[in-house]
Image (spheres, grey):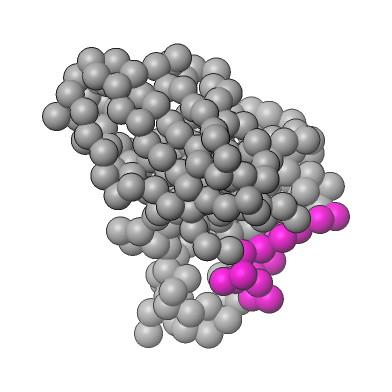
Amino acid sequence: QVQLVESGGGVVQPGGSLRLSCAASGFTFSWLPMHWVRQAPGKGLEWVAFLQNDGRIDNYADSVKGRFTASRDTSKNTFYLQMNSLIPEDTAVYYCARGADYAYWFDPGGQGTLVTVSS
Amino acid sequence: QSALTQPPSASGSPGQSVTISCTGTSSDVGGYNSVSWYQQHPGKAPKVMLYEVSKRPSGVPDRFSGSKSGTTASLTVSGLQADDEADYYCSSYTGSYSWVFGGGTKLTVL
């Protein structure tokens, strides 16, 4: 069955960096785009990032553009989110999500990883 | 990109039907048949319930249905059950590999 396991969250000071990982299994990772979605404490969902299956096309929410970068390692079936210049508003649970082949929807599958930006 | 508009709350009794709306613009909901709905129980990850307006992933009961008219999409839950009590979020593709969520609706089963 499909499994997505996020890791790498933690507490970081404003201005700091963190890299999240998402280990994927149960599907052909190289075939599908991937996304990151986040949820601030007590708030709703926010789409954060998209990366095409071959890594050639990416896009980001305006709130993180220029600070966050998504990448993937097909040999490790792992999806990443490099987060730089973190601000308190980035505090959230981050979920990775499996995209759909030639379609515009996604399915978050993991338990998420909590990122806390605080001094 | 502004968030899609959902009612903050909805409710119904067991066995009844409830409909949750999701209003956007011609740049998102009205421009693409790429509206998805997500169910999230407290402390759990969101789960996709519908995609492409009305399609159900494997395992989602047919009590969940979706539709769209113009710039408003709707999720209908029929035959309400206690376990349907959760937060529901809509999402729409907005073009150029961007997506937007609604603010979420808390569904209460009375």
User: Looking at the image, how many numbered discs can be counted on the residues?
Assistant: 0
Residue range of the region highlighted in magenta in the rendering: A56-71
Q: Position of residue B30 (x, y in %)?
A: 62, 44
State the residue at coordinates (50%, 41%).
B72
Q: Quadrant of the C terminus of chain B?
A: top left
Above or below residue A116? Residue B58 is above
Q: Does A7 sit left or right of A30 as displayed?
A: left
Please tell me which residue is depicted at 46% across the width and 22% down the height of the picture: B65
Q: Is residue A29 magenta?
A: no
Side of A31 relative to A99 (left or right)? right
> What residue do we see at 64% from left, 28% from top?
A26
User: As rendered, which of B106 and B74 lies closer to the eye?
Assistant: B74
Quadrant housing residue A60: bottom right
Please tell me whether residue A68 is drawn above or below residue A81 in the rendered image: below
Vertical side of A17 occupied by A61: above or below: above
Above-or-below relation of B83 to A119: above
Which residue appears at 75% of the width and 55% of the height?
Answer: B96
Query: Which corner quadrant of the image does residue B18 belong to?
Result: top left
Let me know if residue A21 appears in the view.
no
Q: Give percent across and percent down for residue A8.
A: 52, 60
**Residue A71, image x, y percentages:** 73, 58
Could you say which is closer to the camera, residue B45 or residue A25? B45
| Residue B27 seen in this snapshot | yes
Q: Does the magenta segment cover residue A68? A: yes
User: In the rendered image, which quarter is residue B84 located in?
Assistant: top left
Position of residue B68 measured from the top left corner of the image (x, y, whole percent): 54, 33
